[in-house]
């Protein structure tokens, strides 16, 4: 048989099977064949049909008909209609890439499951005959292989199709800033050529699938601003190109989950407030370790200064207790250290412990590892539609200069006084007070230097603006004033109690004077005895003179 297949065949409404193989039919298949409602098998192989296939064939028999057309001369420059190719095994040419590239089926699955009809721009995606490389958001290489799917901010919803794993030539998948829901399909782990994967700013849920061990070419992987949980493992990202922005996830604190997403290899972590931080920037030294090391270093420093006094201070004059008291601070509770009253010592010790406790609270609050108890503020922002994240810290160098200047103006006098007391403690006039002088110097030096360290530490963790720098400094510096404020409170509430605590210190200041008074008293007593002896001698001489006068008169 030969000739064209007449369109009138479509009028045979009860036709169920057509077998016309191995004949000489030519021309195009009539599109009206799609109107046959009952046909379940169409076989016209090994003929001379040409032109393009009509997409109406997919409707034959309600879309359930088997269509076999191999061995004809159809136009190989034109793809078969997508609707026919999607019949898959029911269409014998569906396995031939020149007519039905498999990627089109994968893309169509992706389109349908991501609710493509609702996209902002779906140009080409609904076409039956258009080459898939001309779809909106699709980029192909010279061999017509899909290398990029770029559909950011395009109104995608639904879910990511499992068929995405079939597009193994894919290098960039950019679906950020949409409303894609449900889980990330495990089939995405088949995309071994991926270099860029952006799924950030969607509504993805479920546990993160650890199927990325075979994807070794990634240079950008961003999945922040989703609702994923679990632990991210076996994801290798080369950070040379995008640096800190290379690997970003929701591994920050605070999270919308009680157990946030865990990612040890991420270059940046974001939290529920859309704030991010570079993981390599976090301060992770334990606060107990820092405090312990600092106390030891302060003690060793003061011991070194103390030792220098024996090397260079032998020619220096002895220092009075009044000089020592002024260096310690007569308006501070530290003055009680120089006294003899145990109550004064206890008050001073409590103030020192309380100051260290408060300063340590700032230290604890600036430690990133303490998670939700930390005041740590994230200082990066990752915009939705650009791959590079931006630092959000707004501080000028002048602000750091003002901050350091403020700290130095307040703390340098106390630091100097602490060093002075440690250095001259062996040269104090009253030997019994030398060790107390050293302790007061150690306290002044430790509190002042520790507050400076804590303020820098806390500002690095929390300050994001110029005013934050100064405000934090003022607040922490107030802690160093507690010793003076407590003394004011004691004086205002119970002056007699304060006098009682300080009375021994007053005795100390008057000791030299008391010694001098005793010497004078002893001297006066000795002079009094001498005067009395002189008076007795004078009286005796006067008596003798009178006796001599009486004797002379008798002789006359």
Image (cartoon, helix red, strand yellow):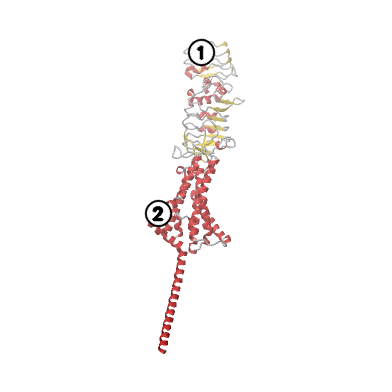
Callouts 2 and 1 close, C-beta under 8 Å: no
Q: Would residue 484 be found to the left or right of residue 399 on screen?
A: left
Secondary structure state at the residue bearing disc 2: helix
**Residue 210 visible in image:** no
Quarter where residue 71 is shown: top right
The residue lying at 54 percent from left, 23 percent from top is 136
Q: Quadrant of residue 309?
A: bottom right
Front-lying residue, 135 or 110: 135
Residue at 51%, 57% (x, y): give it. 421
Q: Which residue is mark 2?
A: 491
| Rendering coords of residue 34 (x, y %) | 50, 15
* Mark 1, secondary structure of its residue: helix
Q: Residue furthest bottom?
A: 555
Which residue of the protein is positioned furthest toward the right in this rendering? Answer: 142
Q: Nearer the viewer, residue 542 or 330?
A: 542
Percent coordinates x, y for residue 222 in the rendering: 53, 34
Direction from residue 291 to residue 497 in the image, left or right: left
Q: Mark on residue 15?
A: none
Front residue of 360 and 277? 360
Q: Quadrant of the N terminus?
A: top right
Q: Earlier in the sequence, mark 2 or mark 1?
A: 1
- The residue labelled by disc 1 is 32
Does any portion of residue 541 appear in the rendered image? yes
* Position of the C terminus by quadrant: bottom left
């Amino acid at each position: 048989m030969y000739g064209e297949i007449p369109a009138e065949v479509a009028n045979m409404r009860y036709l169920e099977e057509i077998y016309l193989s191995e004949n000489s039919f030519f021309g195009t298949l009539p599109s009206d064949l799609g109107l046959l409602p009952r046909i379940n098998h169409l076989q016209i192989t090994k003929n001379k049909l040409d032109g393009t296939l009509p997409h109406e064939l997919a409707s034959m028999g309600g879309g359930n008909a088997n269509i076999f057309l191999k061995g004809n001369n159809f136009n190989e420059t034109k793809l078969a209609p997508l609707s026919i190719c999607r019949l898959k095994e029911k269409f014998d040419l569906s396995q031939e890439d020149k007519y039905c590239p498999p990627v089109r089926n994968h893309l169509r699955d992706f389109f349908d499951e991501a609710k493509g009809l609702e996209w902002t721009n779906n140009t080409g995606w609904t076409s039956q005959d258009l080459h898939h490389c001309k779809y909106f958001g699709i980029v192909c290489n010279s061999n017509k292989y899909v290398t990029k799917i770029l559909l950011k901010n395009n109104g995608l919803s639904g879910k990511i199709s499992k068929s995405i794993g079939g597009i193994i030539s894919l290098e960039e998948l950019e679906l950020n800033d949409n409303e894609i829901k449900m889980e990330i399909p495990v089939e995405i782990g088949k995309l071994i050529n991926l270099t860029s994967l952006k799924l950030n700013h969607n509504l993805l849920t479920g546990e993160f699938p650890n199927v990325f061990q075979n994807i070794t070419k990634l240079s950008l992987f961003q999945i922040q601003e989703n609702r994923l949980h679990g632990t991210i493992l076996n994801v290798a990202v080369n950070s040379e190109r995008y640096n800190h922005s290379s690997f970003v996830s929701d591994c920050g604190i605070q999270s919308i989950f009680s157990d946030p997403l865990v990612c040890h290899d991420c270059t940046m972590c974001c939290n529920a407030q859309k704030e991010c931080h570079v993981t390599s920037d976090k301060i992770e030294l334990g606060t107990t370790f820092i405090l312990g090391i600092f106390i030891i270093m302060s003690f060793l420093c003061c011991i070194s200064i103390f030792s220098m006094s024996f090397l260079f201070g032998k020619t220096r004059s002895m220092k009075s207790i009044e000089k020592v008291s002024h260096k310690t601070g007569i308006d501070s509770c530290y003055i009680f250290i120089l006294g003899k009253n145990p109550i004064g010592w206890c008050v001073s010790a409590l103030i020192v412990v309380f100051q260290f406790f408060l300063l340590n609270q700032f230290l604890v609050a600036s430690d990133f590892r303490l998670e939700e108890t930390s005041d740590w503020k994230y200082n990066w922002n990752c915009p939705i539609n650009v791959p590079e994240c931006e630092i959000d810290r707004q501080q000028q160098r002048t602000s750091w200069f003002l901050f350091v200047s403020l700290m130095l103006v307040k703390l340098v006098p106390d630091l100097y006084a602490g060093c002075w007391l440690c250095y001259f403690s062996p040269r104090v006039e009253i030997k019994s007070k030398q060790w107390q002088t050293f302790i007061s110097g150690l306290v002044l030096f430790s509190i002042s230097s520790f507050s400076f360290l804590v303020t820098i530490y806390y500002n690095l963790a929390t300050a994001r603006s110029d005013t934050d720098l100064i405000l934090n400094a003022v607040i922490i510096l107030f802690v160093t004033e507690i010793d003076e404020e407590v003394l004011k409170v004691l004086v205002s509430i119970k002056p007699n109690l304060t006098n009682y605590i300080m009375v021994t210190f007053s005795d100390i200041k008057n000791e030299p004077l008391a010694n001098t008074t005793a010497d004078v008293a002893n001297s006066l007593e000795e002079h009094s005895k001498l005067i009395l002896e002189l008076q007795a001698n004078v009286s005796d001489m006067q008596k003798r003179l009178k006796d001599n006068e009486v004797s002379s008169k008798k002789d006359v």
